[in-house]
Image (spheres, rainbow, N blue to C red):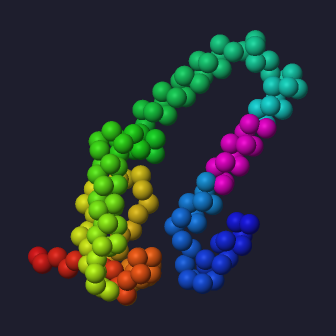
Amino acid sequence: MLDISVFFSYYSTTVVLSRTSNFIYFIFIAGWFYLLYILSNIIFTKGKFSFIKNRKYLYGLSLVFIILFLIKPNNITTAFNDLFSGSAYSYNRQLNERYQFLENCPNDSCRVDSLINIPKTIFYKDITSNSTMLSSEWYGNFFNKKSVALKIQNK
């Protein structure tokens, strides 16, 4: 099923969509955790490692691992920073305002403001001022517009 969806998106646009690659990564990580679950079940049920006898060591090792994991900058700390700093909320608000503007825009060609607060956790590439770019074309197709692009900033 996944192969079919990747094939058709690549065949029609010759570009692997970001959401498709993100979904492939998600499937890989889910499979990885499933494999870890199966292996841990095999190890614990075969009697090679008694969970009850070594529980205190597992708790201590898990606590040390979690502390070391959270001290070092990583995706989870970045996600928490985006959530608690308000940049994720601000990004969502700006994106919804953009969508409302595009839905209510009476013209066939619309120019929108660029997004300011883009959270670090989102793999994101905004549309450009060039309305012939592929992402701008996709925006236009979705909102039934001839073209959607960013407003040209005067410097």
Does the magenta run of residues contain 34? yes
* Left or right, 73 with reference to 36: left
Query: Compared with residue 9, is residue 69 higher up or lower down, i.e. above or below?
Result: above
Does the magenta run of residues contain 35? yes
How far across and down, in percent of the image, does residue 130 sit? 31, 84
What residue is shown at x 29% (from left), y 44% (from top)? 86
What residue is shown at x 76% (from left), y 18% (from top)? 51
* Magenta-tinted stretch: 27-38
Query: Compared with residue 120, is residue 46 higher up or lower down, i.e. above or below?
Result: above
> Split into 4 quadrants, where in the image is the C terminus?
bottom left
Query: Compared with residue 72, is residue 48 higher up or lower down, i.e. above or below?
Result: above
Query: Compared with residue 64, is residue 152 higher up or lower down, i.e. above or below?
Result: below
What residue is shown at x 32% (from left), y 48% (from top)? 89
How far across and down, in percent of the image, does residue 112 sit? 26, 73
What residue is shown at x 33% (from left), y 39% (from top)? 84
How far across and down, in percent of the image, does residue 60 sit? 59, 18
